[in-house]
Image (tube, rainbow, N blue to C red):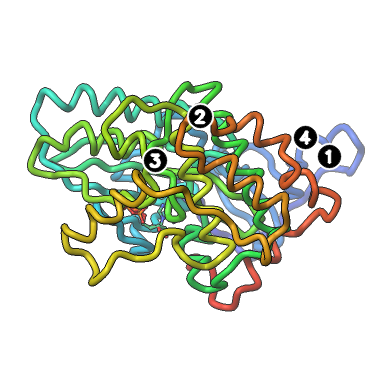
């Protein structure tokens, strides 16, 4: 974009202010312009025609983002697969989150990955984090995502410890809408629903992220970079390596909600940290033991029933996202009209903005 020359003290003689000629000079932003001359409070500038209005925000369908056009602001998160940075588009000033996953993949896997990323990019739903662009370059996958300035539900949970039921219902409703979209419209299973993959922002929105990414990692798990994410929220049918479907995400949702409500991961932590023995112990517990439940003396019967509808060990016995939308736990707090925006912004430490 060409910057204009600033001529601060130039006096400009405007034509008589009759309606017709004013319309010619007045732009939408309240500045006057004629040809390449722009007049506003700051003076007069010679500008190119394209500079007069602010550039339109980049849309996911624009296909115009390139890594060369963005500046890195700071690292905002680290996962097992890579890092997430806050970045800013040089020309529009728009913020994005750039996720970089290091992985050296064989040629044969690249096509598959490109395919998965395309599914990711085609998602158009207010309850799913927008993926603007993805690249594979030099041993790393870079994904440009919508920036969610509240970070993840995991970050939030660390600050608030527990989420009261009315807020949880409002959060859950948005997650269900995201799942409805993924399951019923995109026909994809998320596969890695967990608190760090639910992102929030200051206007009270909750969006699902990283769908498809876990599939990419899993599909390359035979390679040197094995999938090292958490298995904690994985459904019993997935753990045993059987067939699984959309209901697998519903299991994960149940565990996430229970964790938000109680402040603890629903299965007591395996002994002595992360050894392989404890990992198998947890997997075995999920498969062998009865599912967890919400303590009925601390939570409403509706919440307890909702959790139970999600964490049935038999996938067929679990309700679908569609059915859960009509569950009394979701509907009972609707009249309260809870304000997630103030809730998310009220927790003290600043959201992950500049
Ligand atoms: P894993 O690698 O096991 O999946 P993870 O989900 O925590 O774990 P990432 O997806 O890399 O790993 O995300 C790390 C953190 O980065 C998140 O917890 C969140 O705080 C932040 N983050 C990720 N995506 C965004 C985004 N689009 N906007 C804002 N913050 C984000
Ligand atoms: Mg993630």
Residue picked out by circle 3? 235
Nearer to the camera, 247 or 18: 247
Residue picked out by circle 4? 24
* Discs 3/1, front: 3
* Residues packed near mark 4 inside 10 Å, few (<14), some (14 to 19) or many (20 plus): few
Which quarter is ligand 1 in?
bottom left
* Residues packed near mark 2 inside 10 Å, few (<14), some (14 to 19) or many (20 plus): many
Q: Are marks 1 and 2 in contact (CB under 8 Å)?
A: no
Which SS class for mark 2? Answer: helix
Residue 66, numbered circle: none
**Nearer-N-terminus badge (1/2):** 1
* Discs 3/2, front: 3
Image quadrant occupied by the N terminus: top left
Reply above or below: 291 against 323: below
Q: Residue furthest front?
A: 289
* Discs 1/2, front: 2
* Discs 2/4, front: 2
Which SS class for mark 4? Answer: helix
Q: Residue furthest right?
A: 18
Residue 182, numbered circle: 2
Q: Residue at x 54, y 31 (%)?
A: 317
Residue 314, percent from left and from top = 46, 33
Residue 193, percent from left and from top = 43, 44
Q: Residue at x 13, y 44 (%)?
A: 225
* Discs 4/3, front: 3
Q: Are marks 4 and 1 in contact (CB under 8 Å)?
A: yes
Instruction: Give the distance between the C-alpha atoms of the residues marked 4 and 3, in whole angstroms.
Output: 64 Å
Nearer to the camera, 299 or 56: 299
Instruction: Give the distance between the C-alpha atoms of the residues marked 3 and 2, in whole angstroms.
Output: 18 Å
Residue picked out by circle 1? 22
Reply above or below: 258 against 124: below
């Amino acid at each position: 974009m060409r910057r204009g020359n600033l001529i601060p003290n130039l006096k400009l003689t405007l034509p008589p202010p009759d309606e017709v000629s004013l319309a010619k000079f007045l732009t939408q932003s309240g500045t006057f312009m004629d040809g390449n001359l722009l007049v506003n409070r700051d003076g007069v500038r010679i500008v190119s025609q394209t500079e007069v209005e602010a550039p339109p925000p980049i849309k996911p369908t624009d296909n115009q983002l390139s890594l060369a056009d963005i500046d890195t602001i700071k690292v905002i998160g680290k996962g097992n697969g890579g890092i997430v940075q806050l970045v800013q588009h040089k020309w529009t000033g728009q913020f994005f989150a750039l996720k970089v996953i290091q992985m050296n993949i064989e040629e044969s896997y690249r096509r598959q990955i490109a395919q998965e990323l395309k599914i990711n990019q085609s998602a158009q739903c207010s309850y799913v984090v927008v993926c603007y662009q993805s690249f594979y370059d030099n041993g790393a996958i870079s994904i440009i995502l919508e920036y969610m300035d509240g970070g993840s539900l995991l970050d939030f949970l660390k600050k608030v410890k527990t989420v009261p039921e009315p807020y949880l219902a409002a959060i859950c409703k948005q997650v269900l809408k995201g799942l409805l979209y993924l399951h019923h419209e995109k026909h994809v299973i998320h596969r890695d629903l967990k608190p760090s993959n639910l992102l929030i922002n200051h206007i009270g929105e909750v969006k699902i992220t990283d769908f498809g990414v876990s599939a990419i990692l899993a599909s390359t798990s035979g390679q040197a970079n094995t999938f090292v994410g958490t298995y904690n929220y994985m459904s019993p049918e997935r753990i045993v390596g059987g067939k699984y479907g959309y209901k697998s995400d519903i299991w994960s949702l149940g565990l996430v909600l229970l964790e938000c409500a109680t402040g603890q991961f629903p299965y007591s932590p395996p002994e002595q940290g992360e050894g392989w023995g404890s990992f198998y112990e947890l997997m075995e517990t999920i498969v062998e033991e009865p599912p967890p439940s919400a303590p009925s003396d601390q939570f409403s019967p509706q919440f307890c029933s909702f959790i139970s509808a999600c964490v049935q060990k038999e996938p067929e016995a679990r309700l679908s996202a569609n059915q859960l939308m009509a569950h009394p736990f979701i509907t009972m707090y609707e009249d309260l009209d809870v304000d997630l925006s103030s809730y998310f912004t009220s927790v003290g430490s600043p959201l992950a903005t500049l």
